[in-house]
């Protein structure tokens, strides 16, 4: 009896260990039969591993529970994860990595929801939000910032050079100039034309939904430190003065170096109303896997609000280097740089 009970106790961790071992395709057949037996005996063990099952489906397996350093970012931001990983190789700092990654879409005129090239508000002004958090729990943020191409770097300066967490609007701008940032016009011709077009078709009413490509980026370095960043031009054609979830510590992004990190993209109002990223980290603290935690955070939204026209996507990582991704609707994807590979992956979603 004792032996049988011990087996029951040991088997789940044995199966998890199998998931954590790098396997080649050759090993795959041998090991997948073991996993299948494990799945029959312990179906709940398999449930939290949808990301991994997808990987099996793609016949291209990255193990959960391994692979540090790692960088993960919302949407198809492969250039950002690449830049972040390159920075990590130079400085071995997750904080430097997330800043370097976030700066890529900020400077890209083709990216219409972050920094330069971002869609303006309904009055034609590009207003930017960003936040950053390091492994010590330090945080910096800027909101409603105009004419500065790299809000993420201003947020880092707020974190490192001031006693505050958040600077907003003209105050954030004045601070940026004092720190040596350049004043720049961020409204590209493409974004201006899109705004002109929007004005013709819409009655000055912000409708949101589309154009959600905010970058949230999380990283773990070789010292096992976690940092995160998030930067956006926000909801296209929003009301002047609107600030979304992205610069709000605990909403658009949150990191706790004891546990993990989370970040969000999508209609920020609902991420803020549910303290999304903080919730995910707390769920992981209480034992959920990153995948279980992001799913629960999405469930909190769909249980409470009419989600018909909403898209929200969450990413999470834990201290072991496991990750989770989940969104309300299909279509959310993300970039993962881990084990020397930089890949775009599709997230699972609540609505199939
Ligand atoms: N979360 C951002 C905001 O609400 C928008 C987005 O992700 O595109 O400002």
Image (cartoon, rainbow, N blue to C red):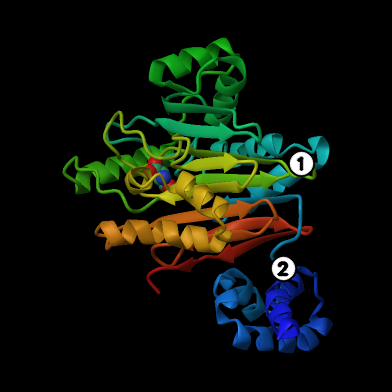
Mark 1–mark 2 distance (CA, rounded to whole Å):
20 Å
Q: Is residue 298 above or below residue 217?
A: below
Question: Which residue carries the number 1 mark?
Answer: 88
- Please state which of residues 125 and 176 is positioned toward the viewer in this rendering: 176
Question: Which residue carries the number 2 mark?
Answer: 62
Q: Quadrant of the C terminus?
A: bottom left
Residue 315 rendering spot, x and y as whole percentages: 54, 54
**Horizontally, is 182 left or right of 69 in the view?**
left
Residue at 76% from the left image edge and 53% from the top image edge: 68
Q: Furthest residue to the front?
A: 1
Residue 23 rendering spot, x and y as whole percentages: 80, 75
Residue at 48% from the left image edge and 35% from the top image edge: 249
- Please state which of residues 327 and 113 is positioned toward the viewer in this rendering: 327
Residue at 54% from the left image edge and 75% from the top image edge: 47
Question: Pointer 1: residues within 10 angstroms few (<14), some, or many (20+)?
Answer: many
Question: Pointer 2: residues within 10 angstroms few (<14), some, or many (20+)?
Answer: many
Q: Of marks 1 and 2, which one's residue comes earlier in the chain?
A: 2
**Horizontally, is 160 left or right of 210 in the view?**
right
Q: Is residue 110 above or below residue 351?
A: above
């Amino acid at each position: 009896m004792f032996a049988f009970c011990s087996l029951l106790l040991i088997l789940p961790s044995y199966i998890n260990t199998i998931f954590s071992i790098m396997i080649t395709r050759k090993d795959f057949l041998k090991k997948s039969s073991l996993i299948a037996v494990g799945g029959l005996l312990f179906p709940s063990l398999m449930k939290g591993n949808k990301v991994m099952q997808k990987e099996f489906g793609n016949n291209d397996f990255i193990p959960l529970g391994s692979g540090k350093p790692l960088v993960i970012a919302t949407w198809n931001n492969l250039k950002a994860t690449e830049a972040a990983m390159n920075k990590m190789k130079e400085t071995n700092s997750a904080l430097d990595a997330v800043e370097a990654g976030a700066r890529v879409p900020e400077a890209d005129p083709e990216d219409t929801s972050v920094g330069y090239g971002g869609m303006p508000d309904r009055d034609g002004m590009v207003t930017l939000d960003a936040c950053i958090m390091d492994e010590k729990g330090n945080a910096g943020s800027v909101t409603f910032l105009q004419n500065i191409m790299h809000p993420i770097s201003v947020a880092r300066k707020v974190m490192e050079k001031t006693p505050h967490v958040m600077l907003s609007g003209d105050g954030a701008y004045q601070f940026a100039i004092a720190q040596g940032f350049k004043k720049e016009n961020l409204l590209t011709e493409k974004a201006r034309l899109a705004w002109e077009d929007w004005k013709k078709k819409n009655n000055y009413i912000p409708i949101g939904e589309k154009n959600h490509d905010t970058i949230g980026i999380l990283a773990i370095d070789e010292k096992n430190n976690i940092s995160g960043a998030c930067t956006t031009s926000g909801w296209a054609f929003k009301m002047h003065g609107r600030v979304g979830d992205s610069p709000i510590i605990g909403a658009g992004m949150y990191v706790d170096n004891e546990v993990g990190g989370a970040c969000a993209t999508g209609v920020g109002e609902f991420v803020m109303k549910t303290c999304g990223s903080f919730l995910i980290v707390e769920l992981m603290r209480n034992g959920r896997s990153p995948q279980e935690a992001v799913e629960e955070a999405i469930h909190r939204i769909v249980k409470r609000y009419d989600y018909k026209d909403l898209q929200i996507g969450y990413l999470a990582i834990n201290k072991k280097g496991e990750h989770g991704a989940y969104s309300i609707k299909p279509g959310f994807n993300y970039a993962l740089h881990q084990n020397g590979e930089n890949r775009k992956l599709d997230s699972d979603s609540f609505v199939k």
